[in-house]
Amino acid sequence: MPAQQDSAQGSGAPGAQILHRLLKLNNRLIAPFSTHLEHRYNITVNEFRLLMMIGRLGTSASHQLSELTGVNTMSVSRAVSALQRHGRIEVTTDPGNRRRKTLTLTPEGQRLYETMLPTTDKVAQYLFEALRPDEIMAFDRYVTTLTDALEAQDEEGRSLFLERTRPDNVDESPD
């Protein structure tokens, strides 16, 4: 990394500098979506993520999509409502569990999935052609390890990540 860019990131810990580069990577990965798909198909980033995941899975439930995408449940709920409102998914009650809803693509959703899939593949191809096969495998291991750490929970089901990154000066009592 050029010295000019490095100094622009401040004197934070090396881990913080890597974190900022990861956040930048995430923002750059969204660019083809927002440039080529978002306005053309009237779809938000979260709706896109869910549509693509439902398309891959065939059938899913909201809680499963939240777990697989890392999108919080409230944002998943909003995206599911919008996808349903636009006729892109069908939401049915699971006969085995009346509280659970099953999500599947409608013919319009399937058409949109198939339309957007090549862009998703192009992004992945472009991103990973910069790496050798062994680097791709190592990167996948790193991403998996970091994701597992972020999803770890204590005995009471609380996020270890959120508990351990809580600011010291935050009062938990609502006022």
Image (spheres, grey):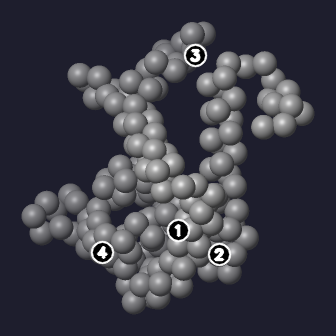
Q: Residue 68 placed where, x, y %? A: 37, 53
Total marks in image: 4
Residue that carries the numbered disc 3 in the rendered image: 167
Badge 2 element: loop
- Residue 92 in sight from this viewpoint: yes
Q: Residue 81 placed where, x, y %? A: 45, 67
Residue that carries the numbered disc 1 in the rendered image: 48
CA–CA distance in space, label 4 to label 3 = 41 Å
Q: Disc 3 vs disc 2: which is toward the camera?
A: 2
Badge 3 element: loop
Task: Specify the amino acid type for callout 2.
Answer: Leu
Q: Residue 156 placed where, x, y %? A: 25, 23
Query: Do tag 3 and tag 2 residues touch (Cβ < 8 Å)?
Result: no
Q: Quadrant of the N terminus?
A: top right
Which residue is situated farthest in the right direction here?
4
CA–CA distance in space, label 1 to label 3 = 33 Å
Of callouts 4 and 3, which one flags the residue occurring earlier in the amino acid sequence? 4
Of callouts 2 and 1, which one flags the residue occurring earlier in the amino acid sequence? 2
- The residue at the point 81 percent across, 31 percent down is 6
